[in-house]
């Protein structure tokens, strides 16, 4: 076994151990690592956004276009962007509403279409298609059973969230079945969450045991 | 104090140590548990295999270093398959902190392993901000969104981009995604408008949500978490970090299942004792 002599693996290993030290109890090493992470992330994002987005797309075409024609349309996003900083002062903070309104309007317009086109219609079609098409008979047993379970799951889960009718009798039974579908769904999500968290631990340990300590390849 | 009380009041740090050992020991002494390939992962592989040489694959690196243990091995495996089949690759990313990961993967696979030529066989446009708005424009006019690559080269000076203009020129798209912006935006804003073959490699925490999009045909396949990455490494016959990690993953899962069963048994006994 030999430890790496590179500076950065040592620095990364020290930060990793500092973060994991929180599992014992809160301590100054954890705090230092946490603050370094937050500061570095914010700095990296700000710097990257300016040099790779704002400068080539906004400032260069407007102020330093080179051989290309100056793009005066960029004045609009420049003003909207500058207005975002007005919220730093109490007297001018009301002006931040203009860029926010613009952003909200665009986002809302895009989201409504996207939800209908990308989610509601395809998902509804996917739920009912196997039954509307005549090819249901061509399905094998498991495909047919899967389609029935999906349709049953959608209908019973929707009945659980329908509160205008009292959950009694046949309607109550459907709602209760919907709860079981929800529980299975939550269980699957929990299982995947555990897997994700263990994967992160594996990733860090592969770094510590491999790149730092060199006890695994 | 009875055994039951001792277990129910167990210091949680003992649980942490047990989980750490369940991961460390299999990493040091691999068991070599088999990795079964599941249909969602096989479908991604099959679609790429069906593409003729020279087809364009769009790869989106939508994760940061915290998602790398799950998504980086999958990124390497998909890139290996694409370059082995002589497909052309356009790389972008919606996470600024993911750019170095994309560059590292391209250097390792495209340059070192397959000796591909930058600008002719692959190109990296790096971080493309704007999320949904960017994707809507990307499908319509790639040149409008990607004016220069990650090294500052104008798109007009990149030979392979002469013929790649819009979503129509892309044969297959895959997003390696760990959150927002990511798979949701690709499905809702890009695929809903421009269709085509779209697949996602997703961190395990978000993977269950995307099975429904496979059922509707909006996704052609899904690589879920480190397990999906290990399956892909098996398919491309190049076991890597994900395959090595699967031993540790399986043993840690067994331990956690044991803890869940133990916790429920204690809960049941305590409930019975109170009665």
Image (tube, coloured by chain):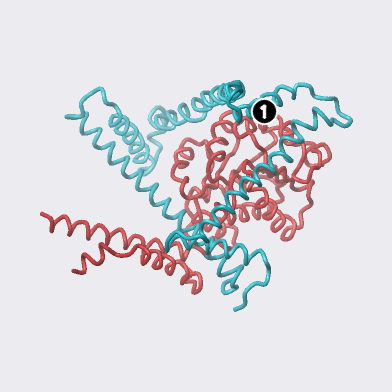
Chain colours: A cyan, B red
Instruction: Name the spot of residue A2 as percent of width and height, x first.
Output: 62, 77
Whether residue A7 is situated above or below residue B82 in the rendered picture = below
| Marked residue chain, label 1 | A
The residue at the far bottom in this view is A1
Instruction: Name the spot of residue B238 as percent of width and height, x first.
Output: 60, 62
Residue A79 occupies which quadrant of the picture?
top right
Location of the C terminus of chain B (image quadrant):
bottom left
**B42 relative to B90 in the view: left or right:** left
In this rendering, the count of numbered labels is 1
Give B33 or A86, whichever is nearer the viewer.
Answer: A86
Which residue: 47% across, 46% down? B207
Residue B241 occupies which quadrant of the picture?
bottom right
**A65 relative to B31 in the view: left or right:** right
Which residue: 67% across, 72% down? A5
Whether residue A214 is situated above or below residue A192 in the rendered picture = below
Q: Residues within 10 Å of mark 1 (few under 14, many from 20)?
A: some
Instruction: Name the spot of residue B124 as percent of width and height, x first.
Output: 72, 45
Location of the N terminus of chain B (image quadrant):
bottom left
Give A112 or B112, whichever is nearer the viewer.
Answer: A112
Instruction: Name the spot of residue A193 as percent of width and height, x first.
Output: 42, 51
Label 1: state its secondary structure.
helix
The residue at the far left in this view is B275
Which residue: 71% across, 30% down? B141
Mark 1 lies on residue: A81
């Amino acid at each position: 076994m030999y430890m790496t002599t590179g500076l950065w693996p040592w620095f990364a290993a020290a930060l990793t151990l500092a973060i994991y030290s929180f599992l014992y109890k809160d301590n100054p090493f954890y705090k230092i690592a946490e603050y370094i992470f937050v500061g570095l992330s914010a700095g990296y994002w700000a710097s990257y956004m300016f040099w790779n987005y704002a400068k080539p797309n906004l400032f260069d075409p407007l102020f330093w276009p080179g051989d290309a024609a100056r793009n005066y349309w960029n004045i609009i996003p420049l003003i909207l962007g500058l207005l975002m900083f007005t919220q730093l002062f109490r007297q001018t903070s009301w002006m931040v509403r203009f860029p926010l309104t613009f952003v909200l309007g665009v986002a809302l317009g895009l989201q409504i279409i996207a939800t209908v086109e990308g989610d509601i219609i395809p998902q509804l079609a996917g739920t009912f298609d196997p039954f509307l098409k005549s090819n249901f008979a061509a399905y094998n047993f498991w495909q047919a059973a899967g389609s029935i379970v999906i349709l049953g799951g959608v209908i019973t889960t929707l009945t659980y969230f329908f509160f205008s009718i009292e959950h009694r009798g046949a309607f109550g039974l459907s709602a209760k079945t919907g709860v079981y579908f929800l529980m299975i769904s939550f269980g699957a999500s929990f299982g995947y969450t555990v897997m994700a968290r263990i994967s992160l631990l594996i990733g860090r340990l592969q770094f510590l045991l491999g790149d730092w300590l060199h006890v695994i390849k | 104090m009875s055994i039951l009380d001792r277990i129910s009041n167990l210091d949680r740090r003992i649980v942490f140590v047990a989980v750490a050992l369940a991961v460390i020991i299999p990493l040091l002494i691999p068991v070599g548990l088999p990795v079964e390939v599941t249909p969602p992962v096989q479908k991604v592989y099959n679609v790429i295999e069906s593409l003729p040489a020279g087809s364009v694959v769009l790869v989106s690196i939508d994760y940061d270093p915290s998602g790398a243990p799950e998504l980086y091995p999958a990124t390497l495996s998909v890139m290996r398959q694409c370059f082995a089949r002589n497909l052309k690759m356009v790389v972008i990313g919606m996470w600024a902190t993911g750019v170095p990961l994309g560059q590292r993967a391209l250097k390792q696979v495209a340059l070192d392993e397959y000796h591909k030529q930058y600008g002719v066989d692959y190109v990296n446009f790096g971080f493309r901000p704007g999320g949904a708005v960017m994707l809507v424009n990307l499908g319509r006019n790639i040149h409008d969104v990607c004016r220069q690559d990650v090294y500052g080269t104008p798109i007009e000076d990149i030979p392979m981009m002469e013929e790649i203009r819009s979503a129509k020129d892309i044969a297959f798209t895959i997003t390696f995604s760990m959150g927002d912006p990511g798979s949701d935006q690709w499905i809702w804003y890009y695929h809903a408008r421009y269709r085509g073959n779209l697949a996602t490699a997703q961190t395990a925490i978000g993977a269950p949500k995307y099975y429904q999009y496979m059922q509707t045909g909006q996704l052609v396949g899904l690589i879920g978490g480190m397990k999906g990455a290990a399956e892909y490494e098996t398919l491309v016959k190049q076991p890597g970090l994900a395959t090595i990690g699967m031993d540790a993953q399986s043993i840690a899962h067994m331990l956690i299942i044991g803890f869940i069963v133990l916790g429920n048994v204690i809960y049941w006994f305590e409930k019975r004792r109170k009665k």
